[in-house]
Image (cartoon, rainbow, N blue to C red):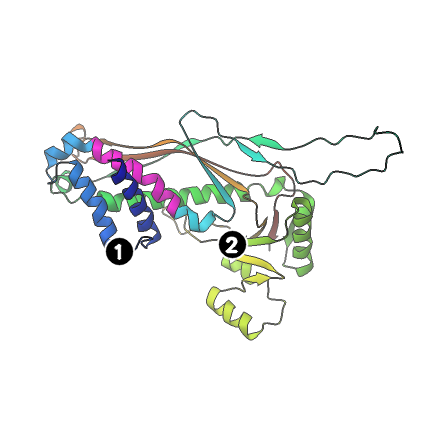
Amino acid sequence: MANQISTLKEVAFDIIKGESRTGKFNKSEMNEYIKQAILESVGGEWNYYSFKQNEYKVFAILAEVLPTSIMASLSERFDSFAEYKDTALGDKNSFHVEDNQLFPVVTSARGTKDIHRSTLLNSNFSVPTTLKAIKIYAELDELMAGKVDFARMTERVATSFAQEIGLMISNAIYNSFSSVGTNYKATGAFDDDQLDTIIDHVKAATGAQSVQIFGSRKALKQVNNSFGFSDRMLEEANDLGYVGTYNGSQLIALPQAYLNRSQTFAVDRDHLIIVPSSEKIAKVVFEGEAYVDSTPAMQRNDLQPEYFWGRMIGAAALTAVEGKYGFYKLS
């Protein structure tokens, strides 16, 4: 069972990524692998009553697969500036933040060591978590006929959770604008000198040799517009929608999405976020195991079985440590 779960996690990762790292499965085959594992857990042949007898074995498989699927969905979008922790239920999570300010070097009179001391300002903080949940229903006859696709359901649930976590990360960062020091942010029309100044402040505060600039495609388009474009830059702008570098700094577009059941963009289209290349400014915590459970159809008047998915999740941004990153709010 342990080996099967390990393989299922790999397969789930591959399904979300849309490719097989091992080359053993294509996407269709990967989905079938999970379906087969579920089928085996109910005795090898689908039957409504065998499912009811073994449904918590099915839920145990889905609960193991779900966290891996969520991480696979998050990894490409936010790995550059987000750090993740997975903790046991009830454990206090802790993130260590290193202070990068230089210590003052003073001239001391010969024969004395009586000089002003500097304190180490490194700190630790924790991220509060809350229960994030999804509830899905199906028709009883679909379940009895074996037409409820638990593999596809898990994939969609994982993608939905990942989008919500992405929104939590974005909100944590955007909401920190007022907490960021004056030298590290600006508001107004795009100006090269202003962006260069923020970049220099972030580098000086953190000791970073390079930064990455994140934003929507719309925001990144404004960054290099004041330069004359070479043929290569024009080709890159045509491919990406923006030029991928600015004075040696890499530009990275945040994937856009809609808020749930709306046509409102989830990612702010007018912010640039300047982040040290080595810094993870967003902290995400998963606490405890994923929950998967159901409300039986016979407990409801509409005879619709419900499936509940939940995970304790929290997200925060480094707002207390001034100079870790910069903002440019474009108008």
Dot 1: within a 10 Å radius of its alpha carbon, few (fewer than 14), some, or many (20 or more) residues?
A: some
Rendered position, 330 above or below 116: below
> Residue 6 or 28: which is nearer the viewer?
6
Q: Quadrant of the N terminus?
A: top left
> Residue 40 or 313: which is nearer the viewer?
40
Mark 1 is on which residue type?
A: Asn
Residue drawn 49% across the image and 45% down it = 170
Give whichever of discs 2 and 1 has the lower sequence position.
1
Magenta segment boundaries in residue numbering: 56-72
Residue drawn 65% across the image and 56% down it = 195
- Tell me the residue that label 1 is attached to: 26
Q: Nearer the viewer, mark 2 or mark 1?
A: 1
- Tell me the residue that label 2 is attached to: 269
Left or right: where 210 falls relative to 21: right
Extreme top residue here? 90
Label 2: which secondary element: loop
Residue 64 at x, y = what percent?
A: 30, 37
Residue 232 at x, y = what percent?
A: 54, 72
Residue drawn 32% across the image and 50% down it = 14
Residue 139 visible, this angle: no
Left or right: where 271 falls relative to 308: right
Q: Quadrant of the C terminus?
A: bottom right
Dot 2: within a 10 Å radius of its alpha carbon, few (fewer than 14), some, or many (20 or more) residues?
A: some
Magenta span includes 140:
no
